[in-house]
Amino acid sequence: MAPGIPKEVHDLLAQVPLFSGCTKEQLRHLAAQGTKLAVNEGRVLTEQGGLQEEFFLILSGEARCLVDGVEVARFGPGDFFGEMTLLAHGPRTATVIAATPMEVLVLTRSEFRTVVENAPDLAWRLLTNLAGRLRAAQSSPSH
């Protein structure tokens, strides 16, 4: 493992379905790209309509996902969000707020792109996940 990358970050990445097909080297690269961040309960991580460009992977804790002020999902360890803005260059589609104290791995647009380019299978898993989220959003009672 590369120096400075906590073992728990590497181990958690290996357990995340999104990264399940990544090699050990790709996981090391992913962990080295991101920044581990401690987050207090109540902190807004993304704001619907905002133009922030970060990808978040939850290492510990829980977050609430709200669309138009209504909670539509809860995220926990191994869950991620923020990829849509990085891939589609548009405003955030949801507000995500820390429901508990959390630790997250944050990747900027360039870090995220580097990770996807170094792990091509990851692109397919991202597309599959996005399609599932889109299908769920379209079938929700508000649509």
Image (cartoon, rainbow, N blue to C red):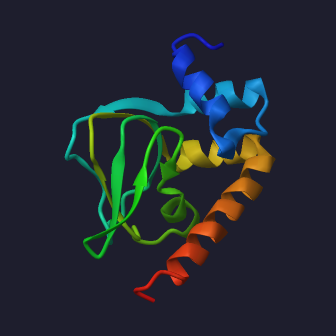
Q: Going by the picture, which residue comes out furthest to the left?
A: 42
Q: Residue at x 37, y 58 (%)?
A: 52
Give the position of the C terminus as an image quadrant: bottom left
> Relative to 17, is 63 on the left or the right?
left
Q: Going by the picture, which residue comes out furthest to the top?
A: 3
Q: In the displayed structure, would residue 4 be above or below residue 114?
A: above
Q: Residue at x 51, y 13 (%)?
A: 4
> Relative to 91, is 45 on the left or the right?
left
Q: Residue at x 46, y 72 (%)?
A: 90
> Relative to 64, is 56 on the left or the right?
right
Query: Residue 9 or 1: which is nearer the viewer?
Result: 9
Residue 13, percent from left and from top: 61, 32
**Residue 107 appearing in the image:** yes
Q: In the displayed structure, would residue 3 be above or below residue 32?
A: above
> Relative to 42, is 106 on the left or the right?
right
Residue 111, percent from left and from top: 56, 42
Task: Please tell me how many numbered marks the rendered image carries.
Answer: 0
Q: Residue at x 48, y 38 (%)?
A: 77
**Residue 5 appearing in the image:** no
Q: In the displayed structure, would residue 109 be above or below residue 6?
A: below
Residue 34, percent from left and from top: 51, 34
Q: Going by the picture, which residue comes out furthest to the front?
A: 141
Give the position of the N terminus as an image quadrant: top right
